[in-house]
Amino acid sequence: MKIKSLVVGSYGTNSYILIDEGSLQCAVIDPGGDALQIIKALDDSKCKVKYILLTHGHIDHTGAVAEIKNKYNAPIAISEKDYKMMQQGAFVYGNIGNEAPIYIEDNQVFEIGDIKLKAVYTPGHTPGGVSFLTDKVIFSGDTLFQSSIGRTDFPGGDFETIIDSIKTKIMVLPDETVVLSGHGPQTFVGEEKMHNPFL
């Protein structure tokens, strides 16, 4: 398993390319902008894009979805609740086009070659927020950051819900689990248990 991390868009969003080195299948997680930069990284990796996976529907995590989709014809996966927020044109939500995406179910497993990537519902930043878990790595989107959490003042956000998501879905993971957030540096579950002021 190989993970490429790119910082894209005007909001400095972390976009990830998760690659199975055996099959050269890959998934793009949160292509938030700078489509040409992401496309170059994908082409340099010579991997086949199997999925475009979205932790949530905000524009800074979805800005390059349409271009990635058009180039590689890979299915888009997002929670139904966040897709509905996008269709309603809610503030700060993006647009991924009218083609129906895969609606992510809680605990759904996406297979990328030999990688099994489990979707874990972590609402609070948005009503349908999702994190993706594999091999002691969790892609937390804007749910959990190093020493911080996602803001909850946008439409569909809820502070009590995000705290519950973090405590019951992420903090129960082993301390050595790497947290790859939607913005900022990586951290570890154990570090956040000890030092995150919101917890």
Image: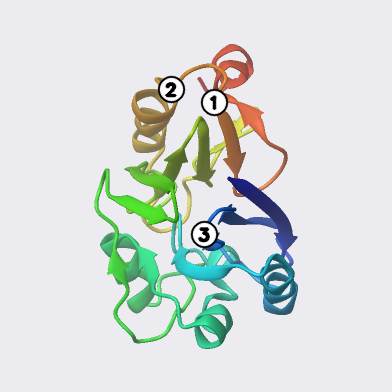
Determine the residue positioned at 34% across, 78% down: 87
Residue at 36%, 30% in the rendered image:
169
The picture places residue 24, in percent across and down from the top left corner, at 56, 62
Q: Secondary structure at mark 2?
A: loop
User: Mark 3 belongs to which amino acid?
Assistant: Ser
In the rendered structure, find residue 158 and report the number of the disc placed on it: none
| Viewer-nearest residue: 10 or 25 | 25
Q: Is residue 169 visible?
A: yes
- Which-is-in-front pick, marks 3 and 2? 3
- How far across and how far down the image is residue 10, in percent? 74, 66
Percent across and percent down for residue 84 are 29, 70
Amino acid type at mark 2: Leu
Q: Nearer the viewer, residue 102 or 22?
A: 22
What quarter of the picture does the N terminus occupy?
A: top right
Q: Report, in whole angstroms, how far the alpha carbon at label 2 lies from the one at label 1.
A: 7 Å
* Mark drawn on residue 23: 3
Which numbered disc flags the more N-terminal residue, 3 or 2?
3
Quarter of the rendering containing residue 74: bottom left
Horizontal relation, residue 134 to residue 123: left or right: right
Q: Residue at x 47, y 45 (%)?
A: 152
Element type where label 3 sits in the image? loop
**Left or right: 22 with respect to 80?**
right
Three-letter residue code for mark 1: Thr
- Residue drawn 40% across and 37% down? 162
Q: Secondary structure at mark 1?
A: loop
Asked if residue 12 shows in the view, the reply is: no
Residues under numbered marks 2 and 1 in contact, where contact means CB atoms less than 8 Å apart: yes
Residue at mark 2: 173
Q: Disc 1 marks which residue?
A: 177
